[in-house]
Image (cartoon, helix red, strand yellow):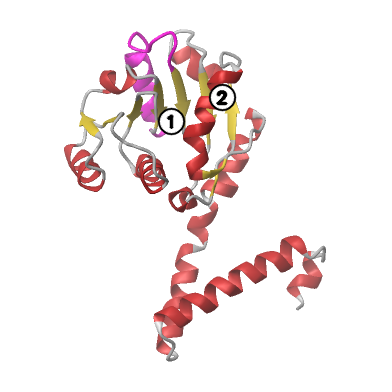
Amino acid sequence: MHAKIGFIGGGRITAIFLSAWRDGGVSLEDVIVSDPNMEVLAKLKADFPEIRTVQENQLSAAQDVVFLSLHPPVAKTVLPEIAKVLSPNAMLVSLAPVLTFRKLSGLLGGFSRIARMIPNAPSMVHRGFNPAAYGAGLSGEDRKLLGRLFCPLGAYPEVDESKLEAYAILAAMGPTYFWFQWQTLRELAGEFGLEKEEADQALTSMLHGAVGLMFESGMAYAAVNDT
């Protein structure tokens, strides 16, 4: 990773990026993460010893590529505070929904070298679906650099900015509706006498097959539901 990377916010999304990069063979030595919560920083440092952790957002904002990993209400407060620190040649990647290019640029005093991405949890194992949109201030070379950073997470299709919020509901929030159901099935399988490996193999195969039947068979939903 040649560019120096800053993360503003050290929560779950930042951990997903760092995990995907590390397990994908990407060095984390040029990564700095800022967060006001020392406990959050301590956990990140324990999990990813190579990174640098700080409480001052201005230090993260002074890097070549800055990832905004904050909820929108917090981001609205932080962005004006880092506006003067951003290098004119830097790129800011917002990982938050709701805040459009126009809003982000306005909060940053007109800064326009911005990309937006909606990340999802499977990115941690390089199987994410992370739709991205690119602002007018980014060149083709800028996109290539971001592509090298996005690639270890999985798919990152370019989409129109107007569709990002829909993807946030579908791809980013979607897995949370299923985790507990799958875990319940795992636990029931154990109660029925299956070993964990047997249950996981059966559940994984069932999920892949069910997805194929619903989305790849060409069958109508009513027919699939009736099988």
Q: Position of residue 34 (x, y in %)?
A: 26, 29
Q: Position of residue 68 (x, y in %)?
A: 40, 28
- Per the image, is 111 magenta? no
Span highlighted in magenta in the image:
70-90
161 and 43: which one is in front? 43
Q: Residue 69: in sight, yes or no?
A: yes
In the orientation shown, which residue stands out farthest toward the bottom? 193
Tell me the kind of residue under disc 2: Arg
Residue drawn at (38%, 49%) of the image: 23
Residue drawn at (50%, 36%) of the image: 150
Reading the image, the residue beneath label 1 is 72
In the picture shown, does residue 6 fall above or below 127? above
Tell me the kind of residue under disc 1: Pro
212 vs 201, left or right, is right
Residue drawn at (47%, 63%) of the image: 179
Q: Position of residue 160 (x, y in %)?
A: 67, 30
Res 161 quadrant in image:
top right
Residue drawn at (46%, 84%) of the image: 189
In the picture shown, does residue 135 fall above or below 204? above
The quarter of the image holding the N terminus is top left
Q: Which mark is residue 143?
A: 2
Q: Position of residue 93 (x, y in %)?
A: 47, 26
164 and 3: which one is in front? 3
